[in-house]
Image: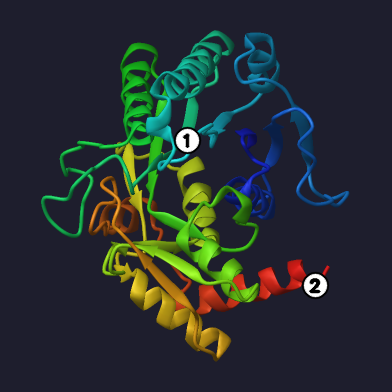
Amino acid sequence: MKLVVFGGGGFIGSAICDKLLADGHQLRIFERPRVPAYREFTGLENVEWMTGDLGNIHDLNAAIEGTDAVVHLVSTTLPKSSNDDPVYDVQTNIVPSLHMLNAMVKLNVKKIVFISSGGTVYGDPQYIPIDEKHPTEPVVSYGITKLAIEKYLHMFSKLHGLKTVTLRVANPYGERQRIETAQGAVGVFLHRALNNQPIEIWGDGSVQRDYIHVSDVAAAFAKAVTYEGQQEVFNISSGHGTSLNDLINMIENVLQRKLAVNYQPGRSFDIDINVLSNELAKAELGWQPQITMQNGLERTTKWLLDSLNK
């Protein structure tokens, strides 16, 4: 298939693109201006690197034209900062996504796979593990905009016959994670540990999250691109909760030394526990996570050490 991947140069996007290329797909990777390719592509890989503005309809049309499907990975905000300016969140995420869907209809591109947020769209859990039928009551703007885009995808599927697949990804971690954006406890904790800096934890460390290695996320997207079933929304997760204190212990085991940890007062927007059921993805997509937390931490640590030594 010929796919356009919006946001294919980032942490998650690059892993997805590498997997799609390994599966033999032809890619057009769309990124912001001045974003360089995340690696050199071989002559055997069919890749077109394209830069532009998601808010520019001409750029969107040029990116989507002639493709078989769209992979939408772009978000301009992070969960913890999205409440600072909800208007910006809406203007830079929902509006461009609608332009993207309109361009698909105009150009007769019938399939889209969208990355949503399993960590924020559900809000405070009513039960654990959270399945796709769980109520969606997000408490951060990031989750609200993700959910709104999901609803527009459903609307376009009904109105225009688009095949839409939404993957609600848990807490991804792994190689190429951007530490400078403070995105993800695993990357931030490891980075501080390797630089002999104390790790800050908000609250008592009992907060549990569902961590999934980025290669497992990429494998799920590869399945979703070719999925022809009737389901529209899937959780992509490990299915297991790991507390921040457990995560510290695991990192200590990988590094073979104790870490300095500073506990700060808890934050009001941090949900105590978020663990997602991945049973629907297993049954429908034929996907399941392959990387254990231990193995994933070892791989991520090696990548970070290699990056620090360059």
For the residue marked with disc 1, what is the amino acid? Val
**Image location (x, y in percent) of residue 73:** 53, 37
Question: Of residues 74 and 281, which is closer to you in this image?
Answer: 74
Above-or-below relation of 271 to 257: above
Any mark on residue 249, and which?
Answer: none
**Image location (x, y in percent) of residue 60:** 64, 17
**Secondary structure type for disc 2:** loop
- The quarter in which the N terminus is drawn is top right
Q: Report whether 260 appears left or right of 10.
A: left
Is disc 1 surrounded by few (<14), some (14 to 19) or many (20+) residues within 10 Å? many
Q: Report whether 241 appears left or right of 60.
A: left
| Residue at 54% in and 62% down | 188
Residue underneath mark 2: 309
Q: Are marks 2 and 1 in contact (CB under 8 Å)?
A: no
- The quarter in which the C terminus is drawn is bottom right
For the residue marked with disc 2, what is the amino acid? Asn
**Nearest-to-viewer mark from 2 and 1:** 2
**Image location (x, y in percent) of residue 192:** 58, 68
Question: Of residues 166 and 36, which is closer to you in this image?
Answer: 36
Question: Of residues 285 and 212, which is closer to you in this image?
Answer: 212
Q: Is residue 150 visible?
A: yes
Above-or-below relation of 106 to 39: above
Q: Is residue 226 visible?
A: no
- Colouring chosen for the image of the structure: rainbow
Residue underneath mark 1: 113
Numbered disc total: 2
| Residue at 57% in and 74% down | 193
Label 2 to label 1: alpha-carbon separation: 36 Å
Q: Report whether 301 appears left or right of 233.
A: right
| Residue at 33% in and 49% down | 119
**Secondary structure type for disc 1:** strand
Say which label, 2 or 1, has the lower sequence index. Answer: 1
